[in-house]
Image: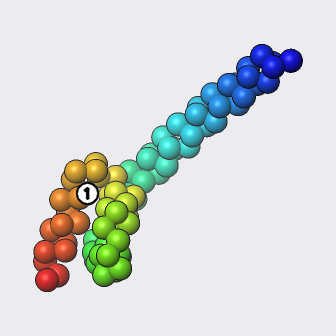
Amino acid sequence: MTWQVIVLIGAVGIIMLIGSALLNRRAQRLAEGRPVDWEALRTDVAAALDRDDLAGAVKIYRQRTNAGLLAAADAVQQIDGDRR
């Protein structure tokens, strides 16, 4: 009985991983064709920085532009520097 529960939990975990990967891939494909509203992006990133939420600002930038982590962090630092 115990090994059956372990196998079931493992199977559910694998199914969840596959589903997550498929949803992430779909979200990336949908975001690729979407134009970026740079002014709204700068405004939202600046608002997050005003709340001292650097991680949130980077997350906003990454979600809207599909940029990598380092590129997004550099861009957020640039936005922060421009507004000071």
Relative image position of residue 79 (x, y in whole percent): 19, 72
Q: Nearer the viewer, residue 51 or 14?
A: 51
Relative image position of residue 41 (x, y in whole percent): 32, 72
Residue type, mark 1 in image: Ala
* 28 displayed left or right of 65: right
* 50, above or below 14, in the image: below
Q: Nearer the viewer, residue 38 or 33?
A: 38
For residue 3, which quarter of the picture? top right
- The colour scheme applied to this rendered structure is rainbow
Query: Local crowd at mark 1 within 10 Å, few (<14), some, or many (≥20)?
Result: many
Q: Considering the image in quadrants, where does the N terminus appear?
A: top right
* 62 displayed left or right of 24: left
Relative image position of residue 2 (x, y in whole percent): 81, 19
Is residue 61 visible in the rendered structure shown here?
no
At a point 50% along the width and 44% down the height, the residue shown is 24
Is residue 14 visible in the rendered structure shown here?
yes
Q: Nearer the viewer, residue 61 or 31?
A: 61
Disc 1, SS: helix
* 29 displayed left or right of 17: left
Q: Which residue is mark 1?
A: 72
At a point 73% along the width and 22% down the height, the residue shown is 6
Q: Nearer the viewer, residue 33 or 61?
A: 61
Q: How many numbered discs sit on the rendered protein?
A: 1
* Residue placed furthest toward the right: 1
For residue 13, which quarter of the picture? top right
At a point 58% along the width and 34% down the height, the residue shown is 17
Relative image position of residue 23 (x, y in whole percent): 56, 43
